Image (cartoon, helix red, strand yellow):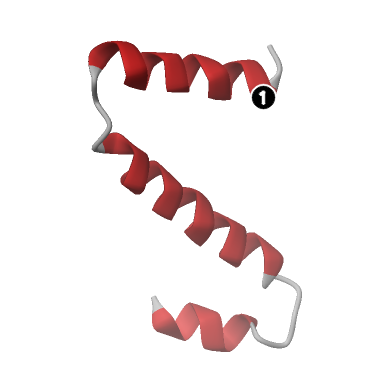
Amino acid sequence: MSKMSIFSEFLGFLKERKKYWLMPIVVMLVLLSALIVMTQGSAMAPFIYALF
């Protein structure tokens, strides 16, 4: 199963069940995880981890 099919299935679920309030939560989780992954090997990592 590809990542795009999971994403499209999730969007279909949101549209069908009218659970649009889940989208901001998912977006924030994705952004925070991307921030942690991108700064993991950099010199900024201690400052980013201090925020949490």
- Horizontal and vertical percent position of residue 29: 43, 51
26 left or right, relative to 44? left
Determine crowd level at label 1: few under 14, some 14-19, many 20+ residues with C-alpha closer than 10 A: few
Residue 49 placement, left or right of 25: right
- Check the picture and name the quadrant holding the N terminus: top right
Rendering coords of residue 44 (x, y %): 66, 86
Res 45 → quadrant: bottom right
Determine the residue positioned at 45% across, 21% down: 10
- Seen from the viewer's position, the closer of residues 33 and 16 is 16
Judge whether 9 appears above or below 33 on screen.
above
Q: Residue at x 68, y 70 (%)?
A: 40
Q: Is residue 8 above or below residue 23?
A: above
Q: What amino acid type should be assigned to the residue bearing mark 1?
A: Lys
Q: Quadrant of residue 42?
A: bottom right
Locate the C terminus and report the quarter of the image it occupies: bottom left
For this rendering, which residue is in front, 16 or 44?
A: 16
Q: Is residue 6 depicted above or below 31 in this figure?
A: above
Which quarter of the figure has residue 18?
top left
In the displayed structure, does residue 9 sit left or right of residue 43?
left
Tell me the residue that label 1 is attached to.
Answer: 3
| Local secondary structure at mark 1 | helix
Question: What residue appears at the point 67 percent right and 24 percent down from the top-left corner?
Answer: 3
Above or below, 15 relative to 32 = above
Q: Position of residue 20 (x, y in %)?
A: 27, 32
Write the residue at 45% across / 22% down: 11
